């Protein structure tokens, strides 16, 4: 059985929802999408101030960490974690530090896989999400299921 992984899908808001859909369609060429978080529009206050459309997808279909890394690079999405994997390597750290450093990405991941354990923190994604605070303003766009059922 192939392990599941979580990926972060993000596009600049000016590219539009169709660009987010295109990334999902492109990813589907390589893997099966199992589940999706809702999609949101986020205004990043701490960085450039640009708006982004973001969501997290749970995927399956790769047998190795390297295969997931290659697929996510080709599909232009960010690999967040692979279920049960801890990898502390400068080239590819899993779980991705973004799950610890970005409360909004953590929230999206917890929507997809609330009971997955963060292999460094030794807590579920849901527990970590409940302990964090999202500071950037976000606006609900659509249910993720609507985007993956294209």
Image (cartoon, rainbow, N blue to C red):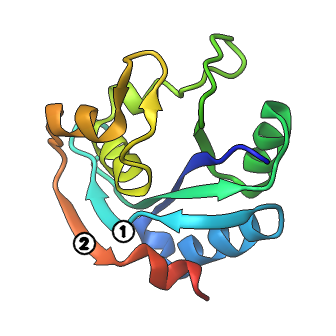
Q: Residue at x 29, y 45 (%)?
A: 104
Visible in this render: residue 59? yes
Q: Is residue 28 left or right of residue 103?
A: right
Visible in this render: residue 48? no
x then y, percent, for residue 50: 33, 54
Q: Residue at x 70, y 75 (%)?
A: 25
The quadrant holding residue 132 is top left
In the picture of the structure, the residue carrying the numbered disc 2 is: 140
Q: Residue at x 56, y 47 (%)?
A: 6
x then y, percent, for residue 88: 63, 11
Q: Residue at x 44, y 74 (%)?
A: 144
Residue 3 sits above or below residue 141 on the image: above
**Between disc 1 and disc 2, whose residue precedes?**
1
x then y, percent, for residue 71: 80, 49
x then y, percent, for residue 94: 60, 24
Residue 99 sits above or below residue 44 on the image: above
Residue situated furthest front in the rendering = 1
In the picture of the structure, the residue carrying the numbered disc 1 is: 38
Badge 2, how many Cα within 10 Å: few under 14, some, many 20+? few
Mark 1 and mark 2: Cα distance apart in space:
7 Å
Residue 92 sits above or below residue 52 on the image: above
Give the foreground label among 1 and 2.
1
Q: Are marks 1 and 2 in contact (CB under 8 Å)?
A: yes
């Amino acid at each position: 059985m192939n392990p599941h992984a979580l990926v972060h899908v993000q596009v600049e808001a000016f590219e539009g929802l169709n660009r987010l859909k295109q990334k999902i369609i492109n990813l589907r060429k390589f893997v099966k999408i199992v589940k999706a978080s809702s999609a949101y529009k986020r205004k990043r206050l701490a960085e450039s101030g640009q708006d982004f459309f973001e969501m997290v997808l749970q995927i399956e279909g790769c047998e190795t960490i390297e295969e997931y890394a290659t697929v996510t690079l080709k599909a232009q999405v960010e690999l967040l974690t692979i279920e049960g994997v801890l990898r502390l390597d400068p080239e590819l750290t899993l779980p991705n530090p973004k799950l610890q450093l970005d409360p909004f990405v953590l929230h999206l991941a917890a929507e997809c896989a609330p009971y997955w354990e963060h292999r460094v923190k030794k807590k579920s994604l849901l527990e970590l999400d409940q302990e964090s605070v999202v500071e950037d303003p976000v606006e609900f766009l659509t249910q993720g299921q609507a985007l993956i059922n294209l």
